[in-house]
Image (spheres, rainbow, N blue to C red):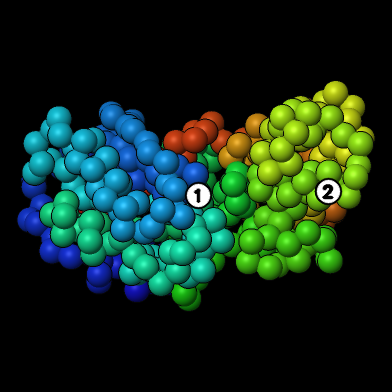
Amino acid sequence: MISASGSYSDGASGRIPPMSSQINYVLAGDIGGTNMRAALADRTGSLVASGSVATEPERGFELAEDRLRALFEEMASGVPRDEVGGVVISSAGPIDPGTGIYVYPPNLPGWHGKTMQPGLAESLDMRVTIGHDATLGALAESRYGAGKGAHHLVYVTLSTGVGGGIIANGQMVTGANGHAGEMGHLLVRPGGQSCNVGCDGCLEGIASGGGIARAAQAGIEAGRDTSIIGMSGGDAAAVNAAMVFEAAAAGDALAVEIVDIVIDAVASGFADILNTLDPEYLVVGGGVTGSLQPYWSDLHALIEEKALPHFKGRVPLHVSPLGDDVSLVGAAAYAFDLADSKSG
């Protein structure tokens, strides 16, 4: 289970091999709605080797587990196994970090109630721990990223979904059931577009990559005149968020309207986070973040407008320098923490 300080247990992680006196590497993984990644990391936070495969959750949980196991084996093949201190996997959630069991994950359909933790622990013959991707992303940002050395930090990822992680007093905050940080379901536009689990007007429903695409598709289905449909080859189902931002940059009316709504929703969500948690750093990453860069000054000003007065002129908003590797780096950092606690 999870302690109040945010640590994960090894209760369901399988047999734990004896710790080497010289743990130089760990294995880190990341499971997202689109891709699964694995890496071999060293103590500097560097990813010595990395690889990825498509998640394809609709093809079945067991097949995804087999492909991730093979990827881990490939990453570990070049170093002595007794120098590898264990495996930590970051994953899109909600997920119970004590058991790795998924709890109705909106971007991993069909995975509810399932866990890779015991199967991977047995097949890899290593301790395996699974945690929430954004929580481990927050750990990475506090160790190696924009908020290096920070004791109070929030990390938000705007990607296929929207997630968040919290560092308070230098510790990961996971909550009573492991679900703390589900900032994607902050209500930012009551009655607005829903996310995949039916939260009307939440941040994920509006500002995730999927939410942005669905807004454009709804406009197309309503008969709006837009260049977005041409970008997708006439197939509304093929529309994605990048197309919407490209069309907005060219002045497309529907796309501009959607992007304006996204910016307002993100500003509302970020203001709520600042008001509630008062972090030293609010770090944001994910693919949608890159698309928002041309609007950054507008977003910053709107956050100031919506946040409490003491944030005027000092909104601690930062873009992650760790990019797509943020959750892998966080998983690696936590894997070393666990390895050192076992060998200490």
Mark number, residue 13: none
Whether residue 81 appears in this view of the structure is: yes
Query: Which residue is disc 2 drawn over?
Result: 221
Of residues 269 and 226, the one drawn nearer to the viewer in this rendering: 226
Q: Residue at x 20, y 58 (%)?
A: 121
Residue at the farthest bottom position: 176
Q: Secondary structure at mark 1?
A: loop
Q: Cβ–Cβ below 8 Å for labels 1 and 2?
A: no
User: On the picture, is 100 further left or further right than 237?
Assistant: left
Q: Nearer the viewer, mark 1 or mark 2?
A: 2
User: On the picture, is 52 further left or further right than 167?
Assistant: left
Q: Position of residue 91 (x, y in %)?
A: 43, 54
Q: Name the image quarter holding the C terminus.
A: bottom left
Q: Name the image quarter holding the N terminus.
A: bottom left
Q: Secondary structure at mark 2?
A: helix
- Please state which amino acid type lies under the numbered disc 2: Glu
Which class describes the residues within 10 Å of circle 1: few (<14), some (14-19), or many (20+)? Answer: many
Q: Residue at x 21, y 36 (%)?
A: 74
Q: Earlier in the sequence, mark 1 or mark 2?
A: 1
From what the image shows, is residue 28 above or below residue 197?
A: above
C-alpha span from label 1 to label 2? 26 Å
Q: Residue at x 41, y 72 (%)?
A: 113
Query: Which residue is disc 1 drawn over?
Result: 33
Of residues 62 and 126, the one drawn nearer to the viewer in this rendering: 62
Q: Residue at x 46, y 64 (%)?
A: 110
- Please state which amino acid type lies under the numbered disc 1: Gly
Which class describes the residues within 10 Å of circle 2: few (<14), some (14-19), or many (20+)? Answer: few
